């Protein structure tokens, strides 16, 4: 899977397509080109069956009903539809949203846009491990609260939030609960009914599926959620999201979830072994390294480290054999230090030293060993050449 000798450790940004997924998708780029909404002939009918088969796999994965799954282009679109779709129906009634400071920009930017439209947003702070306490959500509730948006697992530091407890609080207060599950869907088992989730966003390209396809789970019973659609024109997806469905991508999404679900336990065990090995061997070599996020409630594939005194951008550029990122790839166009690392209580300098290594299904133990050697060596070299160290050597 690796490109030449470059070891890919950026799987939280996106994953490579699993060859088994590609195999399932290919016929839909050839003979099976039908439109799933044009079902008066075999081509369309075949396409419709494929779409509904995938929808069933996704619904089963979440313990949702088939009609509760809406296909979108990805988690960003799902989140936009969920937040704007709920809030636009509440204008003049309720106007308060609760979220947390370490959400992905897909949530934070939409919340900011709702603020410009008259909504008030409470951004809950997180503890030093990036966790939010259910009680914080309870205390932030108001009569005007319409929606709580708390992500399942953080894309930068891998911290997993207490979704079940937060869901209970939302249910008790009759407030809708949106979960951004872009980083957990397929990796962790999720039962939307048991967790009291009303809206859930997920994406295929984080779990070895294709880019450009995602889903929004929309609870249709107790409560039945009504959303103001954001893309109109034809009434596809039960009126929630119009547009001709990308059948190949949907077939791939279904297959990706099928594979993830079957291998979940084994894969998590494998990845957490590699993750812990990497954390232990780096911190053993560099005692000052700070492990960001929780050591317990953490995605099995995520490592986020601060290397005090070292600029993360420079470190990453110097490591020719390892592909990783400073923070979330999605916001790395801006050079501000990560809002997630800062929310943990770190200052700007420490936040600029944070590197994320996110492992994946196709990483081998040999690759991880080589990555550890290169990381340790490069950090040592940078420390030796740092102005602070040179002064001490004089
Ligand atoms: C937590 C989280 N939410 C949302 C997104 C956006 O997902 P998509 O790329 O499918 O729009 C990402 C992608 O990095 C993510 O990590």
Image (cartoon, grey):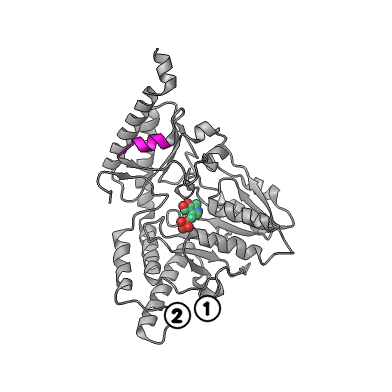
Task: Check disc 2 and report its element: helix, strand or loop.
Answer: loop
Residue bearing mark 2: 37
Is 180 on the left or on the right of 356, as rendered? right
In this rendering, is residue 289 above or below 43? above
Label 1 C-beta lies within 8 Å of the nearest ligand 1 atom: no
Nearer the observer, 331 or 176: 331
Residue 325, given in percent of the width and then of the height, sits at 41, 43
Picture residue at 40% right of the left edge, 30% below the top: 283
Rendered image quadrant of residue 203? bottom left
Q: Which residues are magenta?
A: 313-320
State the predominant SS element of the stretch in magenta: helix
Rendered image quadrant of residue 312? top left
In this rendering, is residue 21 above or below 308? below
Is 284 on the left or on the right of 90, as rendered? left
Q: Quadrant of the C terminus?
A: top left
Residue bearing mark 1: 234
Rendered image quadrant of residue 307? top left
Can you tell which of label 2 and label 1 is closer to the viewer?
1
Task: Check disc 1 and report its element: helix, strand or loop.
Answer: loop
Residue 108, given in percent of the width and then of the height, sits at 58, 51
Picture residue at 48% right of the left edge, 41% below the top: 296
Picture residue at 61% right of the left edge, 58% below the top: 177
């Amino acid at each position: 899977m690796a490109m030449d000798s470059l070891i890919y450790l950026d799987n939280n940004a996106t994953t490579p397509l699993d060859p088994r997924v590609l195999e399932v998708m290919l016929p839909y780029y050839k003979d099976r080109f039908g439109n799933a909404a044009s079902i008066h002939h075999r081509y369309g009918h075949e396409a419709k069956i494929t779409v509904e088969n995938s929808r069933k796999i996704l619904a089963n994965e979440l313990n949702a009903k088939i009609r509760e799954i809406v296909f979108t282009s990805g988690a960003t679109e799902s989140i936009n539809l969920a937040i704007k779709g709920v809030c636009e129906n509440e204008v003049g009634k309720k106007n308060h949203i609760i979220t947390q400071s370490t959400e992905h920009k897909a949530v934070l930017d939409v919340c900011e846009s709702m603020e410009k439209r008259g909504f008030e947003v409470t951004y809950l702070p997180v503890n030093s491990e990036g966790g939010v306490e259910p009680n914080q959500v309870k205390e932030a509730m108001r009569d005007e609260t319409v929606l709580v948006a708390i992500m399942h697992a953080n894309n930068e530091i891998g911290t997993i939030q207490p979704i079940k407890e937060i869901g209970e609080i939302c249910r008790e207060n009759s407030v809708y609960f949106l979960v951004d599950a872009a980083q957990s869907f397929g990796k962790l088992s999720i039962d939307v009914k048991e967790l009291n989730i009303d809206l859930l966003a997920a994406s295929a390209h984080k779990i070895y599926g294709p880019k450009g396809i995602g889903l929004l789970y929309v609870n249709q019973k107790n409560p039945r959620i009504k959303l103001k659609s954001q893309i109109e024109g034809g009434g596809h997806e039960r009126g929630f999201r119009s547009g001709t469905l990308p059948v190949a991508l949907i077939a791939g999404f279904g297959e990706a979830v099928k594979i993830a679900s079957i291998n979940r336990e084994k894969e998590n065990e494998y990845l957490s072994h590699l993750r812990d090995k990497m954390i232990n061997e780096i911190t053993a070599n560099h005692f000052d390294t700070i492990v960001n996020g929780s050591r317990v409630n953490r995605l099995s594939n995520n490592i986020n480290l601060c290397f005090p005194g070292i600029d993360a951008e420079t470190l990453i550029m110097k490591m020719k054999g390892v592909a990783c990122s400073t923070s979330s790839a999605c916001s790395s166009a801006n050079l501000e230090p990560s809002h997630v690392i800062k929310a943990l209580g770190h200052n700007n300098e420490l936040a600029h030293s944070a590197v994320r290594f996110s492992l994946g299904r196709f990483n081998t133990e040999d690759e991880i060993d080589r990555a550890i050697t290169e990381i340790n060596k490069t950090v040592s070299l940078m420390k030796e050449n740092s102005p602070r160290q040179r002064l001490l050597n004089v």
